[in-house]
Image: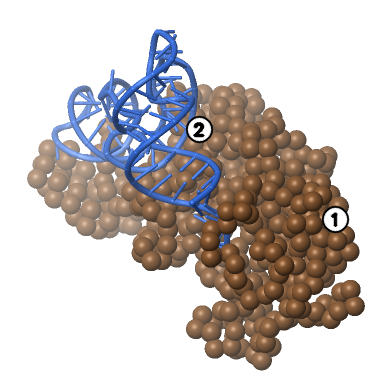
Amino acid sequence: MIRLYNTLTKSVDPFEPLRDDGVRMYSCGPTVYDVAHIGNMRAFLFPDVLQRTLRVIGGYPVHWVMNITDIDDKTIRDSAVGSPRWRSEMGEQTTDPLENLRRFTSFFTQEFLADLRTFGIDVERVVNPLATDYIAQMQDLIHDILVAGYGYISDGSVYFNVAAYSAKHAYGRLFAIDTQNFREGVRIDADEYDRESVSDFVLWKGRKEGEPAWDFAIDGHQLPGRPGWHIECSAMSQEILGLPFDIHTGGVDLRFPHHEDELAQCTAGYHVHEQAAFWMHNEFLEVEGKKMSKSLGNFYTMRDLVNRGIQPIDVRFAMLQAHYRAVFNFTFDGVAAARTARAKVQDYVYDVIAVAGNHHAAADDGAGQRLMDSVGQALADDIHTPRALAALFVFISDHAPRTLTPHDAASIVDALRRLNDVFVIVAIEPRPEQIVPDDIRVLADERWAARAAKNWAESDRLRDVLVSCGWTMKDGKDTYTLEPVD
RNA sequence: GGUCCCGUGGUAGAGUGGCUAUACAGAGCUCUGCAAAAGCUCGUACAUCGGUUCAAAUCCGGUCGGGACCUCCA
């Protein structure tokens, strides 16, 4: 039984898929106007671990959709003719704003997915619909909202009427917003469009010169323009998954207004009470105790980290040591610690595989069962990865490889393989053969001989030589091992 | 201005009204020519001030500090 925190109920509730054919899950995806930063990584790590837990621990097939927002103010601005953010890899800019937008966003979409892949996120499994491929469905939904009486046309745009909606439905189910206490001076005139109330939001934005636009015939009007911010997720989730689906995920910042408005649009236009049974939101991260921002100089893209010699998978491990609903403090010391800890798990995997040899055993046939139980229980409890990892380390120290029978070892390997399909922190494979160059081997043998002759000075000198060649020599009882220097 | 969250050992980070988190770092021991690796052991943490209670770091209130949302934001 998997239990998940649900923003709708503000409690951890038992989870059951609505339909027999698996879990349908929708995650608000990236707006593709730049390369991914580590905050993005945490945001998409969460739904990844969630869908992996549902599959591996829950045993459910998962249909996971994560949209790509390829039409919004930023993508339009940065793809416009003369934009300093245009890159030569995107090709030549054209006179067609929509074509420019496509070239710009497809470039960053590929970059983004590549970054997600290095982070162990299951991009092969997720479906990534583009917002601009669902304009017709969005227009249909806007039409239905208008017909139902929850929208109005003003100055070439279409708006959602929150007051009319609130009269018949609950608005604020995900986030109880107090419209009487909007922060002064900020919300009003937030954009140049005309709407009747500050709490109303735009469904369709009228065309502006030089911007991409689609024709839209509605209610006897011709309203060329583009979709508003929230409509894409409502339309795509209905089109691809069907409403209501099981789980909707996103960052905490999206609870309001984005998710609240998505839900309202679905209820207003599709006449469903629920868009999704569960709404789950992950917390943000801080960097060295401060909110990540370019002005503080603590803003890091994945590329920045790689350039510093950091492996993305170590960052993944570090993030898994915090619960998804808690603010995570990203530090470079923390990543270094994660690297060491992860190497320990990897060593354990290598050693257990060696003990298992040619034996094969299933996780539920031997010691692996205890591992699956203790770690799985933590994961099933609202994706509690910190406790799951703690349980893994406890198991490791209680089950030293040298104490295991081959059968138990094989069972543990099978359990580790399954659990790693959630964590994605190690490679489940035999320890790679270390290729030692001949000249290094010669030096090592020389040193081993000097050491046997108790010629400590020469022995230590040769060890230093080996280190300077990039190899660490470790003396065993009967033989030595060589490892590359870190 | 409104609403809300958090403050745990050197660091990261769980948890619970009375009992071990876990990881990294550190110390000691075993092993070892030395070192590394490995194994064992250890530190006795819970912002602050009051209150409730037989018992609070865990519940309540004040204070201080950090953060979130209300506005593009992962």
What shade has chain B been given? blue
Residue A273, placed above or below residue A184: above
The answer to whether marks 1 and 2 sit on the same chain is yes
**In the structure shown, which secondary structural element does the residue marked by tag 2 occupy?**
helix
Chain shown brown: that is A
Of the pair A205 and B41, the residue shown nearer to us = A205
- Residue at the spot 67% in from the left edge and 54% down from the top edge: A259
**Contact (Cβ within 8 Å) of mark 1 with mark 2:** no
**In the structure shown, which secondary structural element does the residue marked by tag 1 occupy?**
helix
Residue A389, placed above or below residue A183: above
The image quarter in which residue A161 lies: bottom right
Residue position marked by numbered label 2 in the rendering: A387
Amino acid type, mark 1: Tyr
Identify the mark at residue A270; answer none if there is no mark: 1
Q: Residue furthest bottom?
A: A95
Dot 1 alpha-carbon crowd within 10 angstroms: few under 14, some 14 to 19, many 20 or more? some
Picture coordinates of residue A230, whole percent (x, y): 70, 62
Amino acid type, mark 2: Arg
Frontmost of labels 1 and 2 is 1
Q: Chain of mark 1?
A: A
